[in-house]
Amino acid sequence: MEHTLALQKIINVWFTDISQSQDIKDYCTEHFHKKPKYIVGGNPRESPSEEDCPFIVVMNDNKLEGEGLDTYTYSAVIVWAISNTAMIVDGTEQPFGGYPEADTITLKGAVEVDELGQLIYEVVAKCAIDHGYPLSKVEYDLSPKASFPQFVGYMRIETEIEPTMGEILDY
């Protein structure tokens, strides 16, 4: 019988670790005053709203298996979003607005979306290592994809498993 592993099984393990991460919950509570909303699967035509922020969506991407392959590849997509109108203007937090005399302006949400994404990445990377199949590739993107004041991050992650004759694949 050909070796195969349901992609959803891997996704469920990663999702469980993300949703149980105290570091992620603490970060969101400290920065957004609420815990994140966790979602398995996604609807690209109707993403969660600003009121749902912060949220983390874990979705199946693809898998590559077959008798002619020495290594099988499994991938998932993780999308997260936060909402924040605050700005750091010349080192001081200010509400969103025009500051024509400012030397430096940082959109606070642009920083926070990366910080939250890094926490998510670290949780999944540790989970993958704990299961004996470290992440083999991570594409991490914070390019603007949402309307202000939402900031969205996107991560496509892969892990590889080398099947062994007679072994039942499990994760």
Image (cartoon, rainbow, N blue to C red):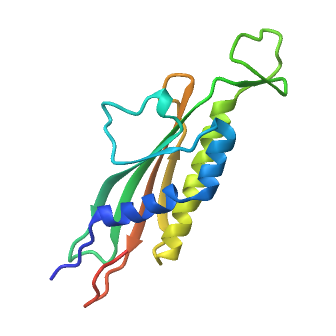
Front residue of 140/37: it is 37
1 lies left or right of 61: left
Q: Residue at x 49, y 29 (%)?
A: 51
Residue 69 position, x and y percent, is: 27, 75
Q: Residue at x 30, y 61 (%)?
A: 8
Front residue of 167/50: it is 50
As drawn, the residue found furthest toward the left would be: 1
As drawn, the residue found furthest toward the front would be: 34
103 lies left or right of 98: right
Residue 73 position, x and y percent, is: 35, 66
Q: Residue at x 70, y 12 (%)?
A: 97
Residue 168 position, x and y percent, is: 27, 84
Residue 76 position, x and y percent, is: 38, 55
Q: Residue at x 64, y 37 (%)?
A: 33
Question: Could you say which quadrant of the image residue 115 lies in?
Answer: top right
20 lies left or right of 12: right
